[in-house]
Amino acid sequence: MNVYTPYAQILRDRGFAGIRVRKVALNGGFTCPNLDGSKGRGGCTYCDNRSFSPVAGSRSVPILNQLDQGISYFKVKCRTERFIAYFQTFSGTYASIPRLRDLYLQAMSHPEVVGISISTRPDCINAEVVDLLEELGKKFFLTLELGLQSSFDETLHRVNRLHTFDDFARAMDLCSGRGFDLCVHVILGLPGESSGHYRHTASSLNQWSYHSVKIHPLHVVKGTVLASQHARGEYNPLECGEYIEGLVDFLERVPASVGVQRFTADAPPEMLVAPQWCRDKAGVLNAMKKEFQRRGSRQGFLV
């Protein structure tokens, strides 16, 4: 028995049993309220979007062309059979309803696409956006990924997120039970946080029903504010052992019904400053399993 719930299990439950499914990252030409001046400029202290979605296409390339390019790549590399169109870059709901509808329907018109995933900020969700997602969720598999990162407002302020946990709560209240899947994105190792913060963030999510979670350590990327803080000795990323303990603390408080889409992440080698250990995904997975086994627990053990 797995000590955690792989996201593949959720996909099987959604009708994709026996089918190799892979996300294709897309660039829908979005921006972010933390970049365009509506809330701020400069973005989060750790963020260079190229590091989070390095394989996404150029915003100047039409969506269907981006899909063709990504699908061709993954068919060769991973022998994938079907694909989920993934609007990953910046805030994928931050546009007018007509534009969002057009972009999402373009992606779903591709014959090899079986679903759509949309990454966004909680303050880019409103009733009109949720109504659109619910409408489209009746026609095809749809997942909305909300970037929380931490349930602590002081942490969010420290990294210049410019949204609050209340913003996230309002978005979750609007989205819950609306006919599409919900994924929550969190980061461990944010400045000023420790395992107690991670445990609280995990437990705070249990007031809602959600379908999947993405977790990764904060990594330092060249050219960011965080990189400057790291160079001055003001921020040190988690050691691998610290991250594993925090990750298992977190997952013990996540219901077993929630699929884990990601338990680590890194950046392209030419952009990653630290920590280098996060590039060893197999090593992180094995260490996580060993820590669960050492504790005699598994995901959801403390829910």
Image (spheres, rainbow, N blue to C red):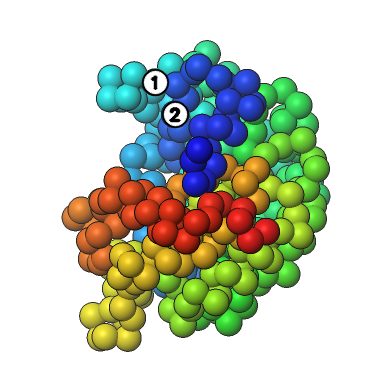
Percent from the top left, x then y, of residue 141?
Answer: 65, 28
Give the quarter of the image for residue 294: bottom left
User: Residue 275, how many percent across, how many down?
Assistant: 26, 65
The residue sitting at the left extreme is 270
Q: Please say if the residues under marks 2 and 1 sit with CB atoms less than 8 Å apart.
A: yes
Side of 16 relative to 287 (left or right): right
Q: Position of residue 208 (x, y in %)?
A: 75, 55
In screen coordinates, is 117 left or right of 234? Answer: right
The answer to whether any part of residue 81 appears in the image is yes
The amino acid beneath tag 1 is: Thr
Q: Secondary structure at mark 2?
A: strand
| Residue at the far top in the pictured view | 111
Image quarter (top left, top right, bottom left or bottom right) of the C terminus: bottom right
The percent position of residue 7, horizontal first and vertical second, equals 53, 38
Mark with earlier residue (2, 1)? 2
Q: Amino acid at mark 2?
A: Arg
Tell me the residue at 70%/53% (across/down): 125
Q: Residue under circle 1?
A: 80
Residue 84 drawn above or below residue 217: above
The foreground one among 211 and 130 is 211
Count how many numbered circles sit on residues in the image. 2
Relative height, residue 303 to residue 89 (above, below): below
Q: Is residue 122 above or below residue 198?
A: above
Q: Is residue 103 visible?
A: no
Image quadrant where residue 26 sits: top left
Q: Regarding mark 1 in the picture, which secondary structure is present there?
A: loop
